[in-house]
Image (cartoon, rainbow, N blue to C red):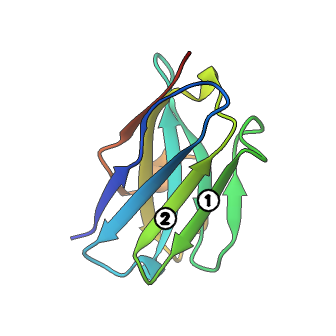
Amino acid sequence: QLQLVESGGGLVQPGGSLRLSCAVSGFSLDLYTIAWFRQAPGKDREGVSCIHTSGVIRNYADSEKGRFTISRDNAKNTVVLQMNKLEPEDTGIYYCAARNQLYGCSPSDAGFRDWGQGTQVTVSS
């Protein structure tokens, strides 16, 4: 059974950085497209960034472009979301999710079957 475990969240001041990790177990990471989603308080879950096994990357929010970087290490079965210059609007629960590599990236959470438990990111002074 595929399992995803997020880590790296926390409280950070505006302008700070966090490095979120998604550890995948149960199956080889190179079989899956992995995406990060965020759910801000009172809002729907939204796509943040996604990486396919081919290395193709999609970033879904203009506000994150240039500030967030997604990467994957298939040997370590880990996907990382590096977040820099964080803003209060980045606050939320961040989830990683997986779908079969036959499917490309998508900003919609509907196509992702397997999810982690989420990690809280709070950006506040």
Question: Looking at the image, is 123 positioned above or below residue 20?
Answer: above
- In the image, 70 versus 123, the foreground residue is 123
Residues at marks 1 and 2, CA–CA distance in whole angstroms: 7 Å
Left or right of residue 33: residue 87: right
- In the image, 72 versus 57, the foreground residue is 72
- In the image, 116 versus 74, the foreground residue is 74
Q: How busy is the neighbourhood of tag 1: few (under 14 within 10 Å), some, or many (20 plus)?
A: many
Q: Which mark identifies residue 13? A: none
Question: Looking at the image, is 84 positioned above or below residue 114?
Answer: above
Residue 106 in sight: no
Question: Residue 60: percent from the left, percent from the top?
Answer: 69, 46
Identify the residue position indicated by label 1 in the image.
70
Residue 89 in sight: yes
Question: Residue 87: percent from the left, percent from the top?
Answer: 65, 26
The tag earlier along the polypeptide, 1 or 2, is 1
Question: Which residue is at 27% across, 68% downward?
Answer: 2
Question: Which residue is at 78% across, 47% downward?
Answer: 66
Marks 1,2: beta carbons within 8 A: yes
- The answer to which quarter of the image holds residue 16 is top right
Question: Which residue is at 47% across, 48% downward?
Answer: 110
Identify the residue position indicated by label 2 in the image.
79
- In the image, 38 versus 70, the foreground residue is 70
Question: Residue 62: percent from the left, percent from the top?
Answer: 78, 38
